[in-house]
Image (cartoon, rainbow, N blue to C red):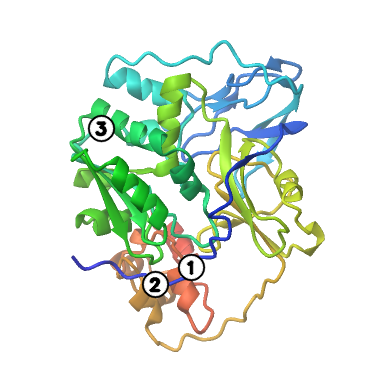
């Protein structure tokens, strides 16, 4: 089976052998009510209230939303308006911690009797996709079409990030337990754990663990970016094509991030909701790169100091990887559910853009066969029909086109702006 196009990147997995370290409880946490795709939550607490670890502090009646829980015990010091890196504004809860980490009596393993109770428990866990997209997990696990294949996304194809890799090395039994849990409850016959070839130890370990289970296949994928993109990993693992306007479920597939499936298994055992995240802290401004497990709401500045970062030298701070991550506008912003890396860069070269030379490199590397230069042209004249014909809505913003462009044109950024022009149903 022919694999989709992509690009070869330097892995820069500097922290792959750095075991996860726990960051101490911070003096204050900030919990935005929007950390996931979908409707933001509303605070369930008010200033002066006492909260406990695992207590629900935000929720929403909208189906496409997940609750927010406190990862600390302490006192609500304020409820503020908070601007996300995307520019949206939501409420955020500030908590002064008391250092006791008293666990809420609400934290107890859920009782699962059928699929409905399982889906309800998944929502109550606060789970969303931990690979960065933040899609509510309970929605993903409750499709309207039959599912025959579960794909565990263990590619982690972005440079620098090793958070998922450490999950694979440190919590392999939780991952296998989560795979079997989801398969059993949803009646899925086959699971494929897709791992990039640059993780031989993980491939070896899981191949041995699944040796006697013919319902779990370990699939080794080439180390080509963007191997972990949903449409790419589905095709390269199964040969199925998710067409424009389709969801993976329309092709009989569910894709789950490896850290998400491990979290769900732990939640079903303990009842502790999603209140911590493992992040890779790296970049040439960081003195001691690490994989850190931090309480959600911890300010980034504290993690950077913990890793001996030269704060004054930072010219660019990226939340996530260098290809699909987002610039962090404020160093005091908090860890959120979708945080998996923080890259502090002190040498950043903003290259000048020149005219397109029609070299076709952007077309050659696009995994979905799009024509970024033509999309760029159609966007500039606001030709909506041409943008539709060029399938701009298929773009997953992997950034490969921008990366290879010799004219330094911001093609991926233009694609996103072009998508915003097209009315959605």
Image point (31%, 69%), residue name: 390
Residues packed near mark 2 inside 10 Å, few (<14), some (14 to 19) or many (20 plus): many
Q: Measure the C-alpha gap from mark 2 to mark 3.
A: 40 Å
Which numbered tag is attached to residue 183? 3
> In the shown orientation, is residue 351 left or right of residue 180?
right
Displayed quadrant of residue 225: bottom left
Foreground of the two, 1 or 212: 212
Residues packed near mark 3 inside 10 Å, few (<14), some (14 to 19) or many (20 plus): many
Image point (61%, 19%), residue name: 44
State which quarter of the image contains the N terminus.
bottom left
Q: Which comes before the other along the chain, label 1 or label 3?
A: 3
Question: Under tag 1, what secondary structure?
Answer: helix
**Of all residues shown, which one is farthest toward the top?**
105
Which percent across, then down, holds residue 15? 58, 55
* In this view, 177 is above or below 154: above
Displayed quadrant of residue 73: top right
Q: Which residue is labeled 2 in the image?
A: 375
Q: Which residue is labeled 1 in the image?
A: 414
Foreground of the two, 243 or 109: 109
Is residue 294 visible in the rendered structure shown here?
yes
Image point (40%, 43%), residue name: 258
Asked if the residues shown at circle 2 and circle 1 are in contact, with their CB atoms under 8 angstroms apart, the answer is yes
Question: Under tag 2, what secondary structure?
Answer: helix
Residues packed near mark 1 inside 10 Å, few (<14), some (14 to 19) or many (20 plus): many
């Amino acid at each position: 089976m022919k694999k989709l196009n992509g690009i070869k990147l330097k892995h820069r997995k500097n922290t792959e052998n750095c075991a996860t370290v726990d960051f101490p409880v911070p003096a204050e946490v900030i919990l935005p009510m929007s950390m996931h795709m979908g409707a933001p939550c509303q605070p369930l607490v008010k200033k002066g209230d006492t909260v406990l670890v695992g207590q629900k502090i935000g929720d929403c009646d909208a189906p496409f939303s997940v609750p927010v829980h406190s990862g600390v015990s302490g006192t609500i010091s304020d409820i503020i308006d908070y601007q996300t890196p995307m520019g949206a504004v939501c409420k955020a809860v500030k908590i002064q911690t008391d250092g006791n980490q008293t666990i809420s009596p609400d934290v107890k393993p859920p009782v699962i009797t059928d699929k409905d109770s399982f889906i309800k428990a998944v929502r109550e866990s606060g789970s969303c996709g931990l690979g960065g997209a933040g899609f509510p997990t309970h929605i993903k696990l409750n499709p309207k079409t039959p599912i025959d294949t579960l794909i565990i996304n263990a590619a982690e194809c972005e440079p620098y990030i090793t958070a998922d890799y450490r999950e694979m090395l440190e919590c392999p039994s939780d991952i296998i337990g989560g795979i079997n849990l989801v398969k059993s409850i949803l009646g899925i016959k086959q699971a494929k754990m897709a791992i990039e070839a640059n993780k031989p130890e993980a491939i070896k370990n899981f191949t041995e663990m699944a040796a006697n289970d013919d319902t779990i296949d370990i699939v080794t994928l080439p180390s080509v970016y963007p191997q972990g993109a949903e449409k790419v990993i589905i095709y390269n693992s199964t040969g199925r094509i998710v067409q424009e306007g389709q969801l993976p479920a329309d092709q009989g597939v569910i894709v789950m991030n490896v850290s998400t499936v491990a979290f769900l298994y732990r939640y079903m055992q303990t009842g502790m909701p999603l209140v911590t995240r493992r992040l890779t802290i790296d970049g040439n401004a960081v003195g001691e790169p690490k994989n850190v497990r931090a309480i959600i709401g911890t300010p980034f500045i504290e993690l950077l100091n913990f890793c001996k970062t030269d704060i004054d030298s930072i010219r660019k701070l990226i939340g996530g990887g260098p290809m699909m991550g987002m610039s962090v506008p404020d160093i005091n912003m908090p860890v959120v559910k979708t945080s998996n890396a923080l890259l502090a860069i002190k040498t950043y070269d903003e290259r000048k853009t020149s005219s397109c030379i029609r070299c076709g490199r952007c077309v050659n590397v696009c995994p979905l066969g799009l024509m970024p230069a033509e999309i760029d042209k159609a966007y500039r004249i606001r030709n909506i029909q041409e943008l539709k014909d060029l399938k701009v809505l298929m773009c997953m913003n992997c950034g490969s086109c921008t990366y290879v462009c010799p004219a330094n044109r911001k093609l991926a950024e233009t694609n996103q702006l072009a998508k915003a022009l097209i009315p959605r149903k």
